[in-house]
Amino acid sequence: MVQAKINGTGYEFPDGISILRAAKSVGVDIPTLCDDSRLKPVGACRMCLVKTDGSVQPSVSCKTEVREGMVIETHSPEIEESRRWNLRMLARDYPASAFKKFPEKHFHKLASGYGLGASDFSADVNGHQVDDSHTYIRVDMSRCIDCYSCVRICSEVQGQFVWHVVGRGEDSHIVPDSLSLFTDSTCVSCGACSDVCPTGALEDKSVLRNGVATEWTKTTCPYCGTGCEMNVGTRGGKVVEVKPAIEAPVNSGHLCVKGRYAFDFVDAADRVTTPMIREDGELRPVSWETAYEFAANKLKSLTAEYGKDSAAVLGSARATNEENYLAQKFARVVLGTNNVDCCARVCHTPSAAAMKMMIGTGAATNSFDDIEMARTILLCGANPTENHPIPGARIKQAVIRNGTKLIVVDPRKTELTEYADVHLQLRPGTNIPLFNSLAHAIIEEGLTDPEFIASRTTEFDEYRAFVADYSPEAVSEKCGVPADLIRKAARIYATDTPSMCMHGLGMTEHVQGTEGVMTIVNLALLTGNIGRRGSGVNPLRGQNNVQGSAHMGCDPGVLTGLVAVDAGRDLFESVWRAPVPKEAGLDQLQMMDAAKAGKLKALWVIGYDVFLSNANSHETAKCFDNLELCIVQDIFLNETARQYADVFFPAVSSFEKDGTFMNAERRVQRIRKMLDARGDSRSDWEIIRDMAVAMGKGEFFNFNSAEEIWNEIRAVWPAGRGITYDRIDDHGLQWPCPDESHPGTEVLHTDSFSNSKTAAFRRIKYRATRETVSENYPFLLTTGRTLYHFNAGTMTMRTPNAELRPTDRLVVSPGDADALDLTGGELVKIISSYGEATLPVEISDVVKSGELFATFHDARIFLNYATSSHRDRFTHAPEYKVTAVNIEKLSSGEVV
């Protein structure tokens, strides 16, 4: 600590703190135009000058550290005059019209505060043309004051390097890397540049269109499982802009294009805000009372006739923890069945199952902050710069700035493969032999952690004997990866430690998805890369609350906290004062099978477009056709609702309710209401509560707020008992957090595993998928997401993101495109043994010859009509990542 005086008052400050930060910490505001806590200080604006004792020249406060005994004056007459002079110099080439029109801009407020008026600014625009080409950001460099904040934040935070300074001295100016229109640049629309711009040279079009926000509310992003916190600005009851929360532990003042800009779905023209019932084949509006009565009576009659297990509920990764808790409680207490599940079934349930079987907890072992602590990152079957952009940017920056080693395992060349030390571009469906081979190389070359193996694992000798058959040379041809690259990756992962593994759906959506994740855990156990910072096994969860929905008990085999139904029965029955069903429940895929067989009669689907999302949509259609009651609860009439809903309950968005989400690193965070519910829509928890009342079980659902529900969750979930709304008001907490004095848990398994002191190695034999190429189906298709859209496109397709990515595309290698005489944008039909879909071609070398990639967001394409029906044998997750297909060139040759 150091002692110093600021404006005559003595203070104590931490070593190494800058004068600017020290002053702010004691409530002294030093003006600045280029300072931002997310950026390295550069002192470009010269506004933060201060007078320090013993120095003849003023000191740049953002770059000068406080020294012992320093005496600092922040607003002496000389300093104030210097600031005024600097502002006048900046104003002389700055348009007066902008100064008058946008008084709230930081530069304008500062100028006004120092007595500058319109006459101090230029009467003429300085020759720069307005660039209005970008979907979200307007560029007007006549308002640029050369603070270079946009250049710095794009490079230092996002790592995209879009903005560049060209020219020298007074001739220098800022341009995008396209050297022409901004829309043609490599910008990914994260909005960081417009966020940091003090003048409006870069401005969000939403603000220009709707006006400046008058109220701000902190909440959590409704998109991917990263869990970015953000401040939502509203005006006149509408969202007008979103800014990242600077202090948020997950995103540290950064957002992606979806979190920052894709909010217009809230007031989309086709938003449904009135309950509906299907009559004569058409959905018609009704009152809530009518909708509840109809649904409740039908559920009662069906379960009375066919039994309690003839009905089922699907919770939602879009809904809050509180709402998913009520969904599974409704299934178990009101319907009397364990038939409850959620969309985690078709994405990361294999991760949860694998990790729970091996190390006792089916969740990420480490935190996103460990990205910067890792010396090696092993990225498996994930494309985070598109699908989890904030962790993706952090990984990229760790490689660029910290020298972190990066190993990418992916059939495609993704953005991060450009930064990778090794890219293992394996053949789709060969994860098991590849990861067994990595283990073989680590053992053969003596790169294991013997101490960790001896103290924390069992069955190593058996495992070593098993992987002896999986040498890199033995699996190279099968995987399509050179043996020397496998060995190189093994050496890096095992020696440049700590090594952190992050994996995505490229590992889980296979017939051996669960076992694939087990092979990752094996690697962590072999090398001791678990239980410490910068290491571990970490699933990148797809949706905002997919971790929470399953964790709250939307899974037939577990109750809240992922405790097995039988193990948790006594506690839950004591809190609920109602019995927990004893019969085994059906998971989502089993529900579909039961519906097709005529055994499942009623299904309540909450915030989940099952028909559009499930693989092999023809089979899904047969299942829904057999239901006698389908209730859909959502913001819009999704494809499941359009085709099959007998009842539609209109729900509110996350901007219209309170509650919590749980992100991929086990962090529970608040969401907050900042908008009134649209029309007659209601929150999911209110709808579930009211349906319980209509079913005659209201006494078990006597809740009046999300917080009341959360407190019951804490009563049945010992590992979350210490997480209160008050404690997570500022930032979230990671479970386990057993009491209110506990700080939360950043790293799991530090001394022992959740189920035992030791973990056993698993010997995973490779079982090849039945989806193989043939004369009729010569290509392997993999599906996934894109940066600009999200899953079924329910939200993003109703925002300007649809301008950035209007539809799905089929990515074809240049060689295959030449062989088939295809051109970019041409519509083609992909045909599998299950069905077909028509979509435009994108020609790119990111895929190898014989392999294809397509996104699945556009209901007009309905890609899942063509995907495989094969399932993982442990969890029944579908094999989205491998489908054998053919490409048919359409005679019309239409181009989009």
Image: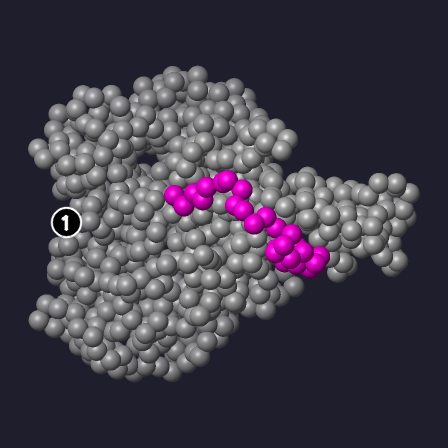
Q: In percent of the image, x 71 and y 53: which residue is there?
A: 31
Range of magenta residues: 108-133
**615 sits to left or right of 45:** left
**123 sits to left or right of 427:** right
Magenta segment main secondary structure: loop
Q: Is residue 384 visible?
A: no
Residue 711 is situated, as x and y percent measured from the top left of the image, at: 51, 72
Q: Nearer the viewer, residue 460 or 96?
A: 96
256 up-or-down from 487: above or below: below
> Per the image, is 124 magenta?
yes
> Per the image, is 492 magenta?
no
Residue 360 is situated, as x and y percent measured from the top left of the image, at: 48, 49
To which residue does mark 1 refer? 618
Residue 6 is situated, as x and y percent measured from the top left of the image, at: 84, 55
Residue 545 is situated, as x and y percent measured from the top left of the image, at: 42, 57
**Amino acid type for the residue under numbered disc 1:** His
**243 sits to left or right of 206:** right
Q: Quadrant of residue 116?
A: bottom right
Q: Nearer the viewer, residue 134 or 713?
A: 134
Q: Is residue 843 visible?
A: yes
Q: In percent of the image, x 10 and y 68: which residue is there?
A: 281
| Color theme of the render | one colour
Q: In percent of the image, x 83 and y 54: which residue is there?
A: 77
Quadrant that contains the C terminus = top left
Q: In percent of the image, x 46 and y 72: which residue is there?
A: 706
Q: Quadrant of residue 397?
A: top right
Q: How many discs appear?
A: 1
776 up-or-down from 193: above or below: above
Number of residues whose C-alpha sits closer than 10 Å to that of mark 1, classed few (under 14), some (14–19) or many (20 or more): some
